[in-house]
């Protein structure tokens, strides 16, 4: 099967890192195609950045790659553009935040999220509420590590995340850790080994969920809110992008 | 005071209609400046349309008009780009859906929403949940009237909305009606007279809330999630739009 | 327009202070008429006090002032008698707690309440739950400052509230402060300047909401729970007060 | 033990009927003392009536009977003045609505409430929310039978309540019926026999809960919100009623 | 009346201790019959233990004692087998956790639970959620005292529970303590005297609720989920236990 | 990898049918080992049946097959014994109800459950609440088809389920159907084709989730509530089953 992995920001370095993490867990017959938004921010750390990222995802959903993909994974923890993407194709679309949340529910009573900037914690809280999973999350914790600093993956960064995770587990009485940024995917195995509890990275979790849905023949429902967008005129730089 | 009214779609006709509705309730000292997104859909009837609209709102928040406004009102019932817009300036920013919901709470125990396409009902439900007001809404009802059909404002359309509202009041046991589309603003007085219960239009409600916040000297908190976006490089058509 | 401001306790000094705060933000055409309960406690700091205050508000709603008012504001943070008052007239009735909560939602992701006696914190929590806004409040904090001590408005009192507010913001991860007592209205500007985040006082917030509803022509729904009280015999000291 | 049964309205006929219902289930050693508010409405069918009733209950809590009672039961389904009453004495105070709700939870997965006027349904919903039991109630149904019409207890009234109960069970998928008015207490056995499901009347339920708490030596907590009211001057007709 | 008290674990010593606690509060006409599961664990401290305990309760419900009882009380704080037991007879069945929670709601705004092993705290949280009472509980606190260590009832154990309770009251802002283990029943009076707030033990609370339901003639609803189990073949060691 | 599929009832015919459904979606390297409870009911249609089933699952978790499995799937829609099973091994354990719920969330805004006996609907509702997913389910619908009647898989049964599903989609405004019984697994493809919306069967969904967790190296957290059961004496028929 073909999974299109869309990085909603414009960092090709992060796209590569995410694609590598995805490929490492993909089943033999799974081909990962990775791309990123054609416009917008190098990293997504505010609602402002996220607004462009969602439009960037929407635009990518018109590509031949998207239309022919067996599943699409959106690789930013805010799941920007997820609902829009679901409207565009029949194949399933999965956001990495929802993937991580649902997966964590299968191995722990309650989990904590450890993310990057503290200002983005409400974003994760909104998603948990939106997905109906707020009761399963015991706390969302910011580390104030900038997203792009994750690319270095140095020991100091790992140690800082580990410390935040240990504090979250103790303070929240939780049993697992969800990593709150696609950029943390490469650190997942290392953190898991150090912490001794399940550590869930959304990118890899989403790949396995996508494979599972595909094997089951499950596609996005077209009955209600995820029906195809209505055709209509678009204007400005987006003039060709009306459905 | 100056209120910038941003229409997140690209219909100048709708911008004018909304601006007229806003001006009709504005206080003597209030100046309404109306604009619309520079790109995207003529009407917003899907998550796909909304993704572009949110980015369109974000772009508008960089204008001199926005930076110098005493308040900003976003005139689409999905409140696209609301969080992003709040980050961009100190002055308050109000979405018409949240304005309508909060206002309805002051005159009724519970309210019903009557909106356009049925497929957009979950959007309103998500907003209610997000704003913490789901318990005050007794039902969200689609009429399958297209947004642009509202421009005509003919008797058939008004009658259809009236019928849906009557059914909602009876079925939901609710006490007031929230109109679920900016394009319904011009019909508010008429529907109110016919129905004999409070009918709340978000555009006019938002104008009065904006005036109130301004008079109280209240601005968006910059302490947490609505702090200014971090400066960073943007790429593609948005290359100049990084903060 | 005429706004009747009802102080549910019997302190004329507090009535004057509240009326001054209200007048300071009223629009040019707004006339503030202030009155207080004809019976009951000098300050409301228990459910027992509140029970009399609600009846006191109900009695005031029979006055000519109330019947001819364009809006009524109830100036005690427990919103005593709010539902009863809504039944009595067509014009909108607003409690200062609900006014503060709804207003705070427009400028912050989540807010904290700083109030007087710790024993009254559950009252505020009940109101938040009742209004459907519990999810928007990150914490309710008592200072154990007696209500009447607020009349002095001395530096020690302001400093104590400021300290409690700072702690609330840090501990709750909130972004704005709601002042949990009508008697704190005169301190709002000062606290706002010191804290650097939105500080919302319910008295002034209610005045602006009342003006807004009046301008929109919105009145309390009479369809359901707020219909006029049924006429019936009343006995004892209240023998003339049946509707 | 002595149980003071306070009827929050001023109907001595209803007080007698309620006292009879209570006495019929009281344990051998239990003495029921019944009284009613010294002022206010003959029946409680609006928030306006309820405001006076709560004050009426508060006043009754100052009586020698209340101070020496082993438990107090408030016999109006709105539980008016319940929190205030709890502050006034150490002995437990129980409202008949909470008594009915908690009791119903012990014999059914979910229950429906059948009450008098439809306009009072939101009152019951507020109580359910307040007590944290909203999830256990599948529906609140008004019959528009006036409270005082219940005194007649004629077949037409019983049949109307029975019909409403049957419809509630079918429509709500519930398993028991809570009677939503103290005046329905005398009909409980009859309805129970006809319906074949548990029918819970709050008056009798409260008596048994009061006996149980007394036997266990459990009294109202004085640690927090139910501490004794603070002593303070009261004015007007209530001038002697400050604590 | 006859109350069958079922200890879901297999410790006859605990059965005796619980029966003594029950007998101490039983009304004159109440006969307590105590028994325990015929198989399973000596104490219930994990979901694994609980799975056998629920089956053990189900088996006991087939006994003549159960079939002729006027009420059944399940004396383990996890309420194992409660729903199954309700299906088996018409008489009411009460779990001690639900009994404690409902009783605590009558004497305090919010309560805290103090239990044995920390790993069992989620069990109590699940029950609170299941019963719809999560909002009334301010916290669940483990002491890591093994269940069987409670049999000794020595001063060190009491002091440890007292300390945990004091910390819970302070930290949670709660007003009463629920003891989270049937084995704590003998300590209830002592802890109550030391703490000065209501301390609720589920065993004694359940006895009084059972007496109350019996006096009211209330039995488990047979309309829906608690209808008699369908007759069907059972296999293995349980081959005779099909209904 | 090896997945142990435990049928919590004692029907070997159902075990075979479920195993076939599982095998049909298993990845090439996945070996399905199927077993059933050694005791208890032929089908699980009441809380009484479920109590034995949970113990039956607990017993199976002690087998060599369970201890050496890479994942365990519990194939009864009530997820009986799920928490107990998680304590017993490190490998992940998945219930088919939770599998179906989480999977449905990925392809639909909200889903409806269509199950067997109406009396079991509250069981599904409890699970949804327990898993934190109640908000994603728009309705649970019983068909009153007995579990064992599903073995026939005849057209009448399929048509009855189809009709119930169509009604659920219309009435609930949902977008996907979750089949509420392991015995419906063989009908999933057929129903999906007829209904044109995603139809989710928990057995196959659980297999894919189990494969995903295994590939990610994720195991049940042992930090808190799912730690290994404490070793202790067991009595009666279960005397050898203490941990």
Image (spheres, coloured by chain):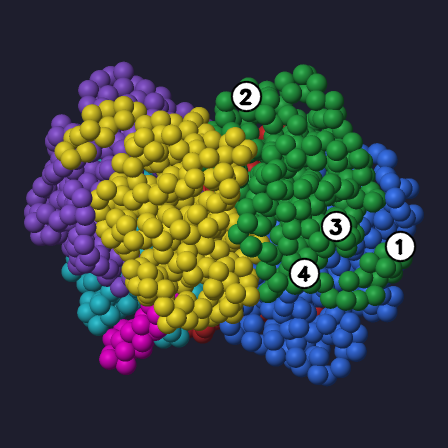
Chain colours: A purple, B yellow, C green, D blue, E red, F cyan
- Left or right of C47 in this view: E34: left
> Which residue is painted at 55% across and 66% down in the image?
B196
Which residue is denoted by mark 1 in the rendering?
A: C237
- Residues at badges 3 and 1 in contact (C-beta under 8 Å)? no
The magenta stretch spans which residues?
F146-174
Which residue is denoted by mark 3 in the rendering?
A: C65
Q: Does the magenta-highlighted stretch encompass residue A121?
A: no
Which residue is denoted by mark 2 in the rendering?
A: C193
Asked where in the image residue D175 lies, by quadrant, the reply is: bottom right
Using the image, name the chain to which the residue with label 4 belongs.
Answer: D
Mark 3 neighbour class, 10 Å CA radius: few under 14, some 14 to 19, many 20 or more: some
Q: Does the magenta-highlighted stretch encompass residue F165?
A: yes
Q: CA distance from mark 1 to mark 4?
A: 32 Å
Secondary structure beneath dot 4 equals: helix
Q: Position of residue E6 (x, y in %)?
A: 60, 55
Q: CA distance from mark 3 to mark 1?
A: 22 Å
Asked where in the image residue F96 lies, by quadrant, the reply is: bottom left
Q: Earlier in the sequence, mark 2 or mark 1?
A: 2
Which residue is denoted by mark 4 in the rendering?
A: D100
Q: CA distance from mark 3 to mark 4?
A: 41 Å
């Amino acid at each position: 099967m073909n999974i299109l992995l869309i990085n909603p920001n414009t960092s090709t370095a992060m796209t590569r890192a995410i694609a590598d993490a995805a490929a490492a867990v993909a089943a033999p017959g799974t081909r990962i195609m990775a791309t990123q938004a054609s416009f917008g921010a190098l990293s997504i750390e505010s609602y402002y950045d996220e607004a462009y990222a969602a439009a960037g995802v929407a635009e990518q959903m018109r590509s031949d790659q998207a239309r022919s993909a067996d599943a699409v994974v959106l690789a930013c923890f805010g799941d920007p553009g997820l609902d829009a993407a679901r409207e565009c194709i029949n194949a399933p679309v999965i956001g990495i935040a929802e993937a991580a949340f649902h997966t964590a529910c299968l191995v722990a009573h309650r989990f904590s999220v450890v993310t990057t900037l503290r200002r983005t914690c409400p974003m994760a809280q909104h998603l948990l509420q939106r997905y109906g999973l707020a009761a399963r999350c015991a706390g969302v914790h910011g580390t104030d590590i900038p997203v792009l600093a994750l690319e270095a993956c140095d020991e100091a960064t790992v140690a800082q995340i580990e410390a935040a995770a240990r504090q979250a587990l103790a303070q929240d009485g939780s049993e697992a850790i969800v990593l709150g940024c696609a950029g943390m995917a490469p650190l997942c195995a290392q953190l898991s080994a150090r912490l001794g509890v399940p550590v869930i990275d959304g990118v890899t979790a989403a790949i396995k969920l996508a494979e599972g849905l595909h094997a089951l023949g499950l596609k996005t429902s077209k009955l209600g809110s995820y029906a195809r967008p209505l055709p209509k005129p678009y204007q400005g730089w987006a003039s060709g992008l009306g459905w």
